[in-house]
Image: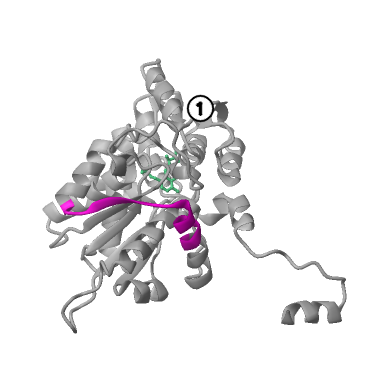
Amino acid sequence: MAWKGIIQEYRSYLPISDKTPVVTLNEGNTPLIHAPRLSELAHADVFLKFEGLNPTGSFKDRGMTLALSKAKEDGAKIVICASTGNTSAAAAAYAAKAGLRCVVLIPEGKIALGKLSQALIHHAKVIAIKGNFDVALTIIRELSSLESVAVVNSINPFRIEGQKTGAFEVCDQLGGKAPDYHVIPVGNAGNITAYWKGYKEYHQKGNISSRPVMLGFQAKGAAPIVLGKIVQKPETIATAIRIGNPAGWKTALAARDESGGKIDAVTDKEILKAYKWLAENEGIFAEPASASGVAGILKLARHKFFTKKQAGAKRSTVVCILTGHGLKDPDQAIKSSKKIHQVPANKEAVMKAMRG
Ligand code: F0G
């Protein structure tokens, strides 16, 4: 049967009734891609779940299908959110599908071009503030009690409910097994919260016999959870996770501690290196924030974290969530790459350039 989106697929796990109007773009069912070169470096079997292949190019679609369906069911007229870009793109698209208005609040000048273009083309009202994501989210919280308004940030529990289906898919794709390790970037900490919830529920239902160790990665300049304190002026090249006071802080800590995992930081240099490495060696173009998970794997691999001490022991299975597509941020891709070779329009010049 054709895939009809995560609500249809995982209906019995979601707070949905026959009365809920399902707003979907057939999100989910993203591929779990084996990464042979990364596996070799990590001494583990590494799989990349490419969430950039969702309809709006990021994992946010999983939460947004549920948030918009419930907003519509509850009679909201306008959905609002603060965003570093991907949430706004998904909110705008799903609001368009639902026939609701959408207002997005973004930090001026700190949104990747692709994401901004999405919010605009889906006809959201885009409001840019001279402040970061944390300030924008504070304003959104203050507006949440307005009549007919639904907040669709991950403080909306339906977002988490939808996003937990990512964990279900991982286990289904691994043949009814949880991975040993689950690697994920952490920004506002909604996704790590959602995945851990998903794994726990699948475990309780008896669909999997174990739960993974959760390994979250923040960017060094925006690593409040790692530092244990709010970062007033978060800075990182990975604009999607440029967040200093995550809404899901407590639940991220719970995911870490209940799973025996860790939340660590990677530098912008490590993120950019992993971003390019992934594109060049595994053929996958993910956005910089997504590459922070890969940077995390490479960092842990340097410390032989995944390496089994006993000779001949079975390798660990590692799943890394690539949260957003690289095309979201074309500026960064061009800035990070080799130059274009400009040559005269003839065969000899092209051949010379080919060999050079
Ligand atoms: N990766 C990407 C590509 C993101 O866009 C985000 C968050 C994250 C990772 C982190 O996920 O917040 O659940 O911990 N983006 C939000 C936004 C903040 O507004 O688009 P998280």
Viewer-proximal residue among 89 and 282: 282
Q: Is residue 214 left or right of residue 243?
A: left
Residue 287 in view, yes or no: yes
Looking at the picture, does residue 82 appear above or below residue 316? above
Amino acid bearing label 1: Gly
Residue 92, position as x, y percentages in the image = 51, 36
Magenta highlight on residue 262: yes
Q: Quadrant of residue 347?
A: bottom right
Residue pointed to by mark 1: 131
Viewer-proximal residue among 322 and 124: 322
Looking at the picture, does residue 94 appear above or below residue 36? above
Q: Is residue 281 left or right of residue 340?
A: left
Quadrant assignment for the C terminus: bottom right
Q: Secondary structure at mark 1?
A: loop
Q: Look at 64% across and 57% down and name the residue there.
A: 334
Q: How is the image coloured?
A: one colour
Residue 138, position as x, y percentages in the image = 40, 24
Looking at the picture, does residue 166 appear above or below residue 244? below
Furthest toward the bottom, the residue is 312
Residue 230, position as x, y percentages in the image = 34, 32
Viewer-proximal residue among 179 and 66: 179
Q: Which residues are magenta?
A: 259-274
Q: Is residue 341 left or right of residue 51?
A: right
Looking at the picture, does residue 318 appear above or below residue 97? below
Q: Look at 24% across and 54% down and name the residue there.
A: 214
Q: Look at 83% across and 70% down and name the residue there.
A: 343
Q: Quadrant of residue 126?
A: top right
Residue 10, position as x, y percentages in the image = 28, 51
Ligand 1 quadrant assignment: top left
